[in-house]
Image (spheres, helix red, strand yellow):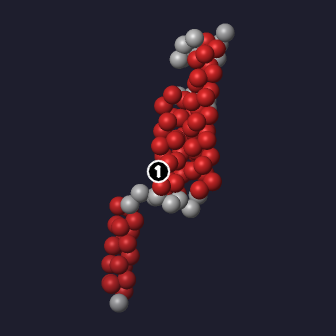
Amino acid sequence: MEFTASASASASARARTGTRDPDGTAVASFVLGLVGLLVFNIFLGPAAMVLASLALRRGTGRRGRALLGLGLGAADLVVLAVLASADGTVSWSLGG
């Protein structure tokens, strides 16, 4: 009996690693959106939005995190647009 229990546990572990985790995707979108407010917002903003929409489509249990990731990704692009219009370039620096 012990052999079959460990065999079924390893089979379920293999099945688990083969699938994408929508909860992890929601958390990743939130983290990318949050970090994107500070650096690399041109890359991290859209990445956060894509991951959030994938997590929502796959039915994540962390719907709030996915929605925050979507909002922060959009905020990243708004920050980029504001800084680009104020500076006249797509890049910006902290030094005057």
Q: What count of labels does the image hold?
A: 1
Q: Nearer the viewer, residue 25 or 81?
A: 81
- Residue 93 position by quadrant: top right
Q: Which x, y percent locates residue 75?
A: 62, 34
Q: Amino acid at mark 1?
A: Leu
Q: Which residue is mark 1?
A: 54
- Residue drawn 33% across and 73% down? 11
Q: Could you say which is closer to the camera, residue 63 or residue 3? A: 63
Counting from the top left corner in percent of width and height, residue 38 is at: 61, 29
Q: Is residue 30 above or below residue 90?
A: below
**Front in this rendered view, residue 75 or 40:** 75
Residue at the spot 51% in from the left edge and 28% down from the top edge: 42
| Quadrant in which the N terminus is drawn | bottom left
Instruction: Tell which residue pokes out farthest to the right in this image.
Output: 96
Q: Is residue 82 above or below residue 44?
A: above
Point 53% across, 59% down: residue: 60
